[in-house]
């Protein structure tokens, strides 16, 4: 059975903070799928993940390089940040990135990964970010966001995702 929690985020700073809190739950081998429209906050949340994991390098959107590895500055796992937006072939193209080799010792965060990377692991954390209210412009950082974090698979069965609400 999947476990899920819903959080309302009202600013980019809160989105980064959510990423930092989420990082405390993550361990090597975890796969995080990030879903949301352009400008929803996927990279901002991943930036917080990087801060929380204590990795080297600024976490920016890997759109043009597809995948970027951020080594740990301490004893924690590296963060592999993937943008699957331009990858249309699903798992075959993802396999070309050798993510399955990185997965056991890394935390892998995949933007636009829904329907493309689920085959990498039966255990994953799915983070869906949506604008909570209104018809403001897509990507407006001041629009509240509803973030639903769902743990899929046995790895997440015992985790208290409600603690992410802060």
Image: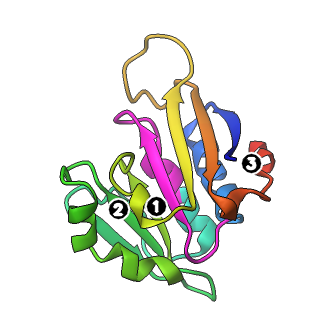
Query: In which quarter of the view is residue 149 placed?
Result: top right
Using the numbered discs, state the Cα–Cα distance from disc 3 to disc 1 in whole angstroms: 17 Å
Q: Considering only order in the chain, which callout, 1 or 3, is on the residue closer to the N terminus?
A: 1
Check disc 3 and report the residue beneath it. 164
Using the numbered discs, state the Cα–Cα distance from disc 1 to disc 2 in whole angstroms: 6 Å
Query: Does the residue at mark 2 contact the one at mark 3 (Cβ under 8 Å)?
Result: no
Q: Residue at x 69, y 34 (%)?
A: 6
- Disc number for residue 109: 1
Query: Does the residue at mark 1 contact the one at mark 2 (Cβ under 8 Å)?
Result: yes
Q: Nearer the viewer, residue 34 or 9?
A: 34
- Colour style of the rendered protein structure: rainbow
Picture layout, residue 76 above or below residue 133: below
Q: Considering only order in the chain, which callout, 3 or 2, is on the residue closer to the N terminus?
A: 2
Question: Label 2 crowding class (10 Å Cα cut-off): few <14, some 14-19, many 20+?
Answer: many
Q: Nearer the viewer, residue 34 or 62?
A: 34
Q: Is 39 contained in the magenta span?
A: yes
Q: Considering only order in the chain, which callout, 2 or 1, is on the residue closer to the N terminus?
A: 2
Q: Residue at x 53, y 62 (%)?
A: 122
Check disc 2 and report the residue beneath it. 82
């Amino acid at each position: 059975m999947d476990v899920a929690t819903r959080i309302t985020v009202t600013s980019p700073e809160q989105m980064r903070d959510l990423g930092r809190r989420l990082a405390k739950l993550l361990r090597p081998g975890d796969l995080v799928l990030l879903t949301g429209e352009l400008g929803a906050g996927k990279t901002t949340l991943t930036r917080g993940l990087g801060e929380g994991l204590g990795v080297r390098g600024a976490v920016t959107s890997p759109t043009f390089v597809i995948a970027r590895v951020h080594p740990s500055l301490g004893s924690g796992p590296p963060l592999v940040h993937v943008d699957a937006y331009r990858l249309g072939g699903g798992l075959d193209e993802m396999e070309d990135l050798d993510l399955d080799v990185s997965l056991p010792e890394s935390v892998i965060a995949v933007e636009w990964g829904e329907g493309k990377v689920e085959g990498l692991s039966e255990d994953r954390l799915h983070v869906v970010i949506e604008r909570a209210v209104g018809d403001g412009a897509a990507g407006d950082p001041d629009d509240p966001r509803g973030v639903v974090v769902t743990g899929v698979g046995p790895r997440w069965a015992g985790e208290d995702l409600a603690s992410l609400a802060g």
